Image (spheres, helix red, strand yellow):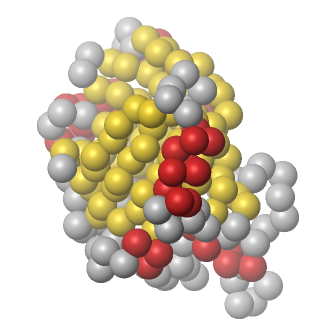
Amino acid sequence: MKAEIEAKFPGVSHDDVRAKLKEHGAACEHPMRLMRRVAIDSDFMRTGKDSFLRVRDEGHRVTLTYKQFDELSVDGAKEIEVEVSSYEDMIAILEQAGLVAHTSQETKRENWRLGDVEIMLDEWPWIRPYVEIEAPTEEELREVASKLDFEWSDAVFGDVMAVYRVEYPHLTLRDTVARVPVVTFGAPLPDLLKSKQD
């Protein structure tokens, strides 16, 4: 599996980030678009690891990804990803194999590139916008983060739940929006994200 070197920076202004990216000569590879995905997490796959399968329609391509988190660190994520020809057909194949998606999710993403570093401007329901940076090395990742005026101490690692846990500190490492059947913009806040005081 390929190790990913990545970090997320929650609660940012995408407009400010775009201005910084342009200032440093970054190129927008894919403008902001709606993406859809389904996921099957490790409890359903019985891998015994913090992992999931995902089918994602990215607007310009469809991918099937196995993602595993060995630890919540800058290089703790591992993945295997392939392009597939059809979102619906890939989901149907997994269902026939007994791997039924338990959540359907929509998100928004914009992709930028600065040298060998990929910068993703991400939006998910019920949280503020965030940025994910993926680079060949931690040094390059930190360098681009600095150019974008991010503090390394604000970086979070792991899947999107690391960002949700910043905004909803009552969430545990076992809590996941993958347990919400439909994750969509404009939907009411699910019980998972409501604190006990609400």
Q: Residue at x 49, y 56 (%)?
A: 94
Task: Report the front residue among 186 and 133.
Answer: 186
Q: Is residue 75 above or below residue 62?
A: below
- In the image, is 186 to the left or to the right of 145? right
Nearest the eye: 117 or 166? 117
Quarter occupied by residue 112: top left
Horizontal arrangement in the rendering, residue 27 relative to residue 146 (left or right): right
Q: Is residue 67 visible?
A: yes
Whether residue 13 is visible: no
Residue drawn where x is 56% and y is 50% of the image: 91
Q: Nearer the viewer, residue 86 or 53?
A: 86
Q: Nearer the viewer, residue 187 or 133?
A: 187
Q: Residue 152 location, x and y as percent? A: 31, 49
The image shows residue 53 at horizontal and vertical percentages of: 43, 57
Looking at the rendering, in which quadrant would you find the C terminus?
Answer: bottom right
191 lies left or right of 148? right
Q: Please, is residue 154 above or below residue 69 in the view?
A: above
Where residue 40 sits: x, y (%)? 50, 64
Residue in the image at 19% along x and 45% along y? 2
Q: Quadrant of residue 142?
A: top left
**Which residue is depicted at the point 54% across and 72% down?**
176
Q: Residue 195 location, x and y as percent?
A: 69, 83
